[in-house]
Amino acid sequence: MTDLPNLPVTLDDIQAAAKLLDGVIAQTPIEVSRALGRETGSDVYFKCENLQRAGSFKVRGAYVRMAKLSPSDKARGVVAASAGNHAQGVAVAAARLGIAARVYMPHGVALPKLAATQGHGAEVVLHGHNVDEALAEAQRYADETGAVFVHPFDNVDVVAGQGTIGLELLEQIPDLDTVIMGVGGGGLLAGVAVAVKSRARELGRDIRIIGVQAENAASYPPSLAADALVPLTRVSTIADGIAVGRPGQLPFSIIRELVDDVVTVSEDSLARALIFLLERAKMVVEPAGAVGVAALMDGKIENPGTTAVILSGGNIDPMLMLKVIQRGLAAAGRYLVVRILLDDRPGSLATISRIIADADANVTGVDHTRVGGSISMGDVAITINMETKGHEHCDLVLKNLRAEGFQPMVLEG
């Protein structure tokens, strides 16, 4: 094994962070995923940071950063910006350390994350329409008032705090071959990479580190290819916890040296992964925490071996969960929505209902309208929502409808 390059965060930093966190955070459990293991032909374990205090790993880095402040810095208070998880981590750490905290969150932030941040005692200010705009305003406030800016990922102490997960992983799963996790700005990926790669070198082993991004918020692949920070012009994903348009400079300097690969997953893959975690693992996980599972389910990681997937957070808005569940079921062929134009005469809807019932599909909703730009006089549009049993079953329902002369347009499924 070759020596690790000189890096801004070291194993010593992470071990010191672990001592600071002793008694403050939970050592989150490891759960075996037999279902995903069978699917991938490997041993798969989940590191359940969705069960951490405040619902995500973020409290680790926030606490380490703030615990190391001088008394005068603590007296000035702290300011941060986040879509939710870092906000809650800062609020929890500030309350424990007796520090006043102001947190900027973008407009449209999930209400449970907003309420939880306020509930932990932080002052919340809504600003901007994304995390990058909230970050800029938080930095402006820090410059103006002297409050200490607690960056969500671009800070040595924050990265060291997140890296403590890597130390726990190697204690809990000594024979690890691969570690997979989501990446937004890069603090978690960088910290875990330092911890795991450093320990692996001491053991004379090689452990792969894989980052995963949502394909509509994937700033790392182009940045790594260019060996420079490449900001995205647009970010759009249900994984709000990793919806970051520009890598952090400090994490990037570590990730380009230590991380083996960064892969991407689609929104449909994310939805399927969340459904899998709910049904098979009985885990409530937010989209950003499920990207590693999505990558495994998509076959994005070859020969993973003994694998740990970090479920980085569980703070999901129930309204988003409803939408994600519907999308995930549709992506799996278990939810089908069709729109059918037909003559407005008695018996047509009954015929369609019979065809669907004969195919053993279950209608869950019907919308019947005679008004619309594509609807002619004397016609009616029927939108039917139904439960199905997979893609083949969807195809059978559609085939049977067409055999009776109907022309269903698939809206979902």
Image (tube, rainbow, N blue to C red):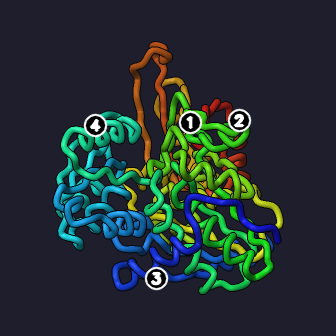
Q: In the rendered structure, which disc, 2 or 1, sits on the residue that comes first in sequence?
A: 2
**Residue drawn at (41%, 37%), measured in percent from left and top?**
367
Q: Is residue 366 above or below residue 55?
A: above
Amino acid bearing label 2: Ala
Give how far apart the Cα atoms at labels 2 and 1 are: 39 Å
Q: Is residue 8 left or right of residue 70?
A: right
**Residue drawn at (76%, 68%), measured in percent from left and top?**
3
Amino acid bearing label 3: Gln
**Residue drawn at (65%, 84%), measured in percent from left and top?**
173
Give how far apart the Cα atoms at labels 4 and 3 are: 35 Å
- Residue 309 in the image: state x and y as whole percent: 62, 69
**Quarter of the image where one finds residue 128:** top left
Q: Is residue 45 above or below residue 349?
A: below
Q: Nearer the viewer, residue 127 or 198?
A: 198
Asked if labels 2 and 4 touch by Cβ distance under 8 angstroms, the answer is: no
Find disc 2 in the rendering and name its residue.
226
- Can residue 357 be seen at all in this image of the molecule? no
Q: In the rendered structure, which disc, 2 or 3, sits on the residue that comes first in sequence?
A: 3
Find disc 3 in the rendering and name its residue.
27
Quadrant housing the C terminus:
top right
Q: Secondary structure at mark 3?
A: loop
Label 3 environment density (alpha carbons within 10 Å; few <14, some 14–19, many ≥20): some
Label 2 environment density (alpha carbons within 10 Å; few <14, some 14–19, many ≥20): few
**Residue drawn at (43%, 47%), measured in percent from left and top?**
365
Q: Secondary structure at mark 2?
A: helix
Q: In the rendered structure, which disc, 1 or 4, sits on the residue that comes first in sequence?
A: 4
Give how far apart the Cα atoms at labels 4 and 2 are: 30 Å
Give how far apart the Cα atoms at labels 2 and 3 are: 37 Å
Q: Is residue 88 left or right of residue 187?
A: left
Find disc 1 in the rendering and name its residue.
411
Find disc 4 in the rendering and name its residue.
140
Q: Nearer the viewer, mark 3 or mark 1?
A: 3
